[in-house]
Amino acid sequence: MTDAGDLAGLDAELASDRLDDAELVEAADPGGMLRQVASSAAQVRSAVRACSEVDLSPVTSPGRPRAIVVAGMGGSGIAGDVLAAICGTGHSMQVVTSHGYELPGWVGAADLVIAVSCSGSTEETLAVATEAVRRGSNLVGVGAAGSPLQAIATQARAPFVPVVSAGMPRSTLWGLSIPLIAIAERAGVLDVGEDVYEATAAALEQIAFQCRPTSESFVNPGKSLALDLFGTLPMIWGTSPLSGVAAKRFAAQLDENAKYPAIAGELPEANHNQVVAFDGPFAPGATRLNAESGYPLRLILLGDPAAHPQVARRQAASAELATDRGIRVSELAMEGEHPLPRFASVVQLIDYATVYLGIASGVDPTPIDIIQELKEQIS
């Protein structure tokens, strides 16, 4: 009789063969999610140009806002988390994300609200944009041209930055994030510059080349990471606010691209709760539950050279504790001086790996039918 471990090994071998067949990879990705991910560098450059063509003076001429509130959901809403992470915890001005129907109670006329929606029709984001106008806050809309969000911005005489979707909101991360960063820069909150945008685009291009579908798994970091994750339960920890957002993105992309569960966290907080799962039923060989499920924990650590020194120690200790318990560990290192290309250096790899994991598992990466089904049930 073949046990769960033997079956997992056979499945992993089939997954590897599937990813190394370029024709099969293309056939398994009918929605073109890999092509959408490959457009990331072009999104950066296009977004920079689009922002340069928009008159942002209504929100930048009054001077620096008291706070920036970014409203958005899902693959659009994470752009606000990116902006907050790029600004960093040491910034004197507050950057807050709103993932829901309501603005925080303290938001008023001294604050800047950026409503971001790839489709321009996300109901939660439209509700927040309308509320921002009612409260007299400065508003900028970011999303699809001709959308309800643009209509709200036009009626309020607020700037609107048009975004051309790469196909799905989650694959338009850069087209949605760069306008937010450019708006913050124009408002005097950030110092980025053309060289940083170009360095970001160059980093995205380099990873896209390394992860191209025709590159075999033993030299393709996206495919290799996908195969490392295959048949495991990923626990993904960032080591800084910046890599913490990358961990959140990683888990969300696993959900949508691979239809695959994951647990996201950030050090040091994860060392105060999630680490205890190392001694639980999903640790390799811990109990019958794990042996029958065939899904042992795998720890993924996203290292950031800007992490607090004590967090760097926690990263090393966490890897050692996991290894001692038979939990395999993958460590991804951010690279670059500025936070924006540093973020790009990990996120582009994450996006490829999650698409490849879907393909390796026999899952079409693009559809998210259940989200539409849920929307229809509550409409």
Image: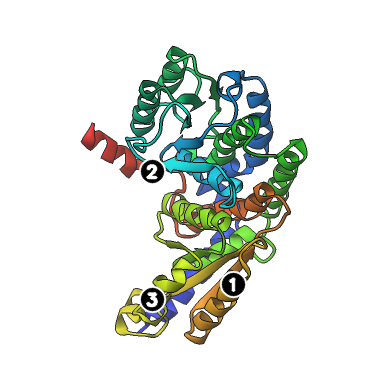
Asked whether residue 30 is in view, the answer is no
Task: Say few, some or many: other residues with alpha carbon within 10 Å of mark 2 (under 14 / 14 to 19 / 20 or more).
Answer: some
Tell me the quarter of the picture where residue 379 sits.
top left
Spatial CA distance of label 3 from label 1 is: 22 Å
The kind of secondary structure element at disc 1 is: helix
* Mark 3 burial class by Cα count in 10 Å: few <14, some 14-19, many 20+: few
Residue 116: x percent and y percent?
47, 32
Question: First in sequence: mark 3 or mark 2?
Answer: 3
**Residue under circle 1?**
310
User: Considering only vertical position in the picture, is 118 above or below 258?
Assistant: above
**Rendered residue at 70%/54% (across/down):** 210
Amino acid at the residue labelled 1: Gln
Side of 337 relative to 15 (left or right) = right
- Give the residue pinned by disc 2: 368
Upstream in sequence: badge 3 or badge 1: 3
Residue bearing mark 3: 277
Label 1: few (<14), some or many (≥20) within 10 Å?
few
Amino acid at dot 3: Ala
- Of discs 1 and 2, which sits in the foreground? 1
Residue type at mark 2 is Ile
Q: Position of residue 114 (x, y in %)?
A: 49, 31
